[in-house]
Amino acid sequence: MTQDELRLLPWSGPGGRPCYLSTDDRDGYVSRLADHIEALQLGAATQLREEALEILEDRGIDDEEDMALLAARLAGALGDVLRVANSRGHLLAKLAPS
């Protein structure tokens, strides 16, 4: 990564605005922290997906409030996963030989 390229970080700034990192050190503290947070987000999304499938297939949800909560949690997890995919896709494109 060159100095003028930005990495989308896995958290938002004030007002939900995206945060970016400008560095050429992929092993720096903030880069490693971002990698760790991304791994946590992907793990949480995987676990939530499994829980949602179990609820929807086995038990079902009778209460609209519970369904709305599940949908909100899934939407949040999807947002995290999309941010990770966008960030990693950008990094992969920059690392690929031209």
Image (cartoon, helix red, strand yellow):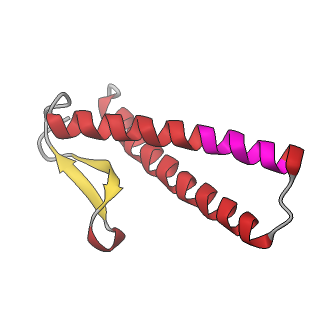
Residue 75 to residue 41: above or below: below
Q: Is residue 96 left or right of residue 2?
A: right
Q: Position of residue 51 (x, y in %)?
A: 70, 43
Taking the magenta stretch, the answer to whether it contains residue 54 is yes
Residue drawn where x is 87% and y is 45% of the image:
57
Q: Quadrant of the N terminus?
A: top left
Q: Nearer the viewer, residue 66 or 80?
A: 66
Residue 29 to residue 61: above or below: above
Residue drawn where x is 43% and y is 44% of the image:
84
Q: Quadrant of the C terminus?
A: top left
Residue drawn where x is 55% and y is 52% of the image:
77
Hey, which quadrant is residue 27 in on the image? Answer: top left
Q: Nearer the viewer, residue 63 or 23?
A: 63
Q: Position of residue 86 (x, y in %)?
A: 43, 47
Taking the magenta stretch, the answer to whether it contains residue 71 is no
Q: Is residue 53 left or right of residue 92?
A: right
Q: Nearer the viewer, residue 66 or 25?
A: 66
In the picture as drawn, the residue positioned furthest to the bottom comes out as 15
Secondary structure character of the magenta stretch overall: helix
Residue drawn where x is 79% and y is 71% of the image:
64
Q: Position of residue 56 (x, y in %)?
A: 83, 50
Q: Is residue 80 left or right of residue 35?
A: right
Region rendered in magenta: 47-56
State how many labels appear: 0
